[in-house]
Image (cartoon, grey):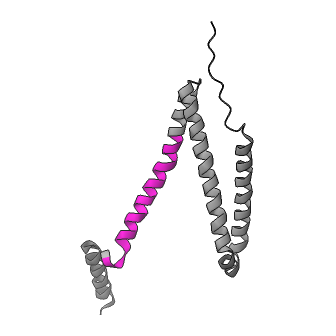
Amino acid sequence: MSTTAPRVRPALSSAAVRYVLILCVGLGAVALFLLATASGNSTLFADQYPLLLVLNGAVVLMMTGLVVYQLLTLRRKLKSGVFGAKLTLRLVMLFALMAVLPGALIWCRYSFWHVRSTPGSRCAWTRRSRAASISAAARSTGC
């Protein structure tokens, strides 16, 4: 009695996935070229900004689609019990944590800094330290 696991296609075997990946690379190259040429000339950048925005948005949407496709393939592999699928899931979780955690920390730090640096939300210790430094500077100049 031989039991064989259901056959699961490799992730990049589909021709559509290959074409989307090639299209993403092509659009990314075009967007990079436009960004490089527009950075030296601000009027050209202003003229090409909508095109850059649309191209980058298209690349983001296609990359998101590829990630969703890969996650669905991984889910299918996990359900069918393919050897190595649990290890792949652990690696995906590890890479996701390594990508999201630093980004979240930087975002929190800069959003906190932005709130603290707006003129209407100055803390009392900031005003006191600024007043102390101004009075110290006035004393040192003899005013």
Specify whether residue 27 is painted magenta. Answer: no
Point out the image quarter for the N terminus: top right
The residue lying at 43 percent from left, 64 percent from top is 110
Q: Picture coordinates of residue 112 (x, y %)?
A: 37, 64
Q: Is residue 73 above or below residue 23?
A: above
The residue lying at 71 percent from left, 48 percent from top is 21
Number of callouts: 0
Q: Tell me if 60 is positioned left or right of 25 in this view.
A: left
Q: Is residue 14 above or below residue 99?
A: above
The residue lying at 65 percent from left, 57 percent from top is 59
Q: Main secondary structure of the magenta part?
A: helix
Q: Is residue 136 above or below residue 84?
A: below
Q: Residue furthest bottom?
A: 143
Q: Is residue 104 above or below residue 71?
A: below
Q: Picture coordinates of residue 58 (x, y %)?
A: 64, 60
The residue lying at 57 percent from left, 38 percent from top is 72
Q: Tell me if 136 is positioned left or right of 58 in this view.
A: left
Point out the image quarter for the C terminus: bottom left
Q: Picture coordinates of residue 81 (x, y %)?
A: 56, 24
Tell me which segment is drawn in magenta.
94-120
Specify whether residue 106 is painted magenta. Answer: yes
Q: Residue furthest top?
A: 1
Quadrant for residue 130, please give it: bottom left
> Could you say which is closer to the camera, residue 127 or residue 55?
55
Q: Picture coordinates of residue 15 (x, y %)?
A: 75, 42
Quadrant for residue 142, please give it: bottom left
